[in-house]
Amino acid sequence: MEQFLFYAFAAMAILSALLLVSIRNTARALFLLFIVLFAMAGLYLFALADFVAITQILVYVGGVLILLIFAFMLSNKELLADLQSTSQRFMSLPNWQSMSLSLAFLAVLVYSFIAWTKEAPEWMARAQADGSILSPTDDNIQTLGLKFMTQYILPFEIISVFLMMALIGAAHLSRREGSR
């Protein structure tokens, strides 16, 4: 089951990222970025980087993506009009893609919830047997600091550069056309 979930998250991240860079509609690109960020958080969980996964969701999905959505909404009314001029049928092609992707994500979440309530995954049981799980009485802040500055320095710096690029992109999108 763990392999299936890993490959499901990896496929979701790769396919959504490929669609993200090839799509021309900004609103759909923001939705695909949302999927990529959530799939990457799932992959971080498989890398036993649960703090990075939670940070991914809180900072990028909760902060950066919301900032980009507000910048998009405030930037250009023609982009919003383009969204409204698409097909009014309920089950047009983009709706089918969105529905199938959402249902697949829901199925993965429901199946993992059911499977994990019955029995802990093998990698969690192995970590418990090795004694490599942090307990609430451990010095978590010192351990996280050491991990960030040693083992996870590259992902930590990549995330900080991505955050700066997202802020610059949001500022660029929120500029008015006439003020250039």
Image (spheres, helix red, strand yellow):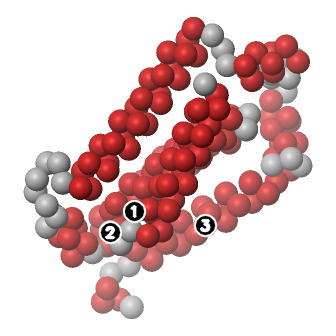
Residue at coordinates 32% horizontally, 48% vertically from top-left?
98
Does the rendering let one see residue 54? Answer: no
Residue 164 numbered mark, or none:
3
Q: How many marks?
A: 3
Residue at coordinates 51% horizontally, 59% vertically from top-left?
17
* Vertical side of 81 occupied by 132: above or below: above
For residue 69, side relative to residue 169 (left or right): left
Q: Quadrant of the N terminus?
A: top right
**Residue 120, position in %: x, y?**
66, 14
CA gap between label 2 and label 3 equals 23 Å
Q: Mark 3 or mark 1: which is in front?
A: 1
**Residue 164, position in %: x, y?**
61, 67
Contact (CB < 8 A) between labels 1 and 2?
yes
Amino acid at dot 1? Ala
Residue at coordinates 43% horizontally, 36% vertically from top-left?
105
Amino acid at dot 2? Asn
- Where does label 2 land, which residue? 25
Disc on the earlier residue, 3 or 1: 1
Contact (CB < 8 A) between labels 3 and 1?
no
Q: Quadrant of the C terminus?
A: bottom left
- Where does label 1 land, which residue? 29
Q: Nearer the viewer, residue 124 or 80?
A: 124
**Residue 158, position in %: x, y?**
71, 61
CA gap between label 1 and label 2 equals 6 Å
Crowding near pointer 2: few (<14 within 10 Å), some, many (20+)?
A: few
